[in-house]
Amino acid sequence: MEAPAELLACERCGLSGSRTRVVVGSGPDEPELLVIGEAPGRTEDEGGLPFIGRSGQLLFTLIGEVMGLTRDRCYVTNVVKCRPPGNRTPTREEVGACRPWLRWQFEHVSPRAVLTLGLVAGQSVLGFSVAMGAMHGRLVTVAGRPGLGTYHPAAALRQGPSLVQVMRADLATLREAMDA
Ligand code: URA
C-alpha cells in the first residue's frame, strides 16, 4: 500500500517542524496482526520505519515467542506518525491531527487482530478511558476483529521482567482469541 503524497508532506500539526521523516508504517496489506504504538522515537525518525529500535526488538521477540508470528506477518504503525521532540507523549491535538492517517490505514489494511501498545494507543484506538492497569489484557472488538491493549515495550524495558510477564500473558490472550 503506497502512502499518499499528502501524508509524506503532512503539516497538520507542529511535529512536522521537527521531524526528520514521516514514519508511516510497514507490513503487508493483509497481516495477521495490526500493531499500533504511540509515536516514532529517535531511531524510527531517522530510519523511517516504526519499531526498529530497542522497543521493537523486545516487542517482536515477545510476539514471536508468544504468538508465533514474525514481523513480516504484522503491519506496524503508530497513532502519531512523526516524532515528538524528546520523545514526549503526543498531545491530544497531535493525536487528533494524525487520526485521518490512521483511519486511512484501517481502510487499507485488513488484519486478523489488532494490538495496541501503551496508554495513548489503547485510548485512541480501542476507546478505553481507563489507565493501563485496567485496560491491558481486555479483549474488545475493533473494526470487527479481536483487539487488545498491552503495555508499551518501552515501559517493560524500564520496569523489567515483571512487566514483560504481563505483556506475555496479554499477548497469549489475543492469540487465543485469534485461534477461537
Ligand atoms: N515507540 C513507539 O511507540 N513507536 C515506535 O515506532 C518506536 C517506539
Image (spheres, rainbow, N blue to C red):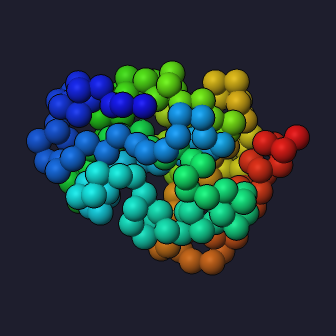
Which of the 4 image quarters holds residue 97? Answer: top left
User: Furthest-left residue in view?
Assistant: 17
In this rendering, position of residue 52 left or right of residue 174: left
In this rendering, position of residue 24 left or right of residue 166: left
Q: Quadrant of the N terminus?
A: top left
- Percent position of residue 92, x then y: 35, 34
Which of the 4 image quarters holds residue 161? Answer: bottom right
Near-viewer residue (87 or 47): 47
Q: Residue at x 66, y 43 (%)?
A: 32
Near-viewer residue (16 or 95): 16
In this rendering, position of residue 11 left or right of residue 80: left
Q: Residue at x 83, y 49 (%)?
A: 176
- Percent position of residue 57, x then y: 49, 68
User: Furthest-bottom residue in view?
Assistant: 161
User: Total number of numbered labels?
Assistant: 0
Near-viewer residue (44 or 135): 44
Q: Residue at x 65, y 29 (%)?
A: 142
Q: Quadrant of the C terminus?
A: top right
Q: Residue at x 27, y 29 (%)?
A: 7
Near-viewer residue (6 or 137): 6
- Percent position of residue 109, x then y: 53, 30
Q: Is residue 163 visible in this depiction of the protein?
A: no
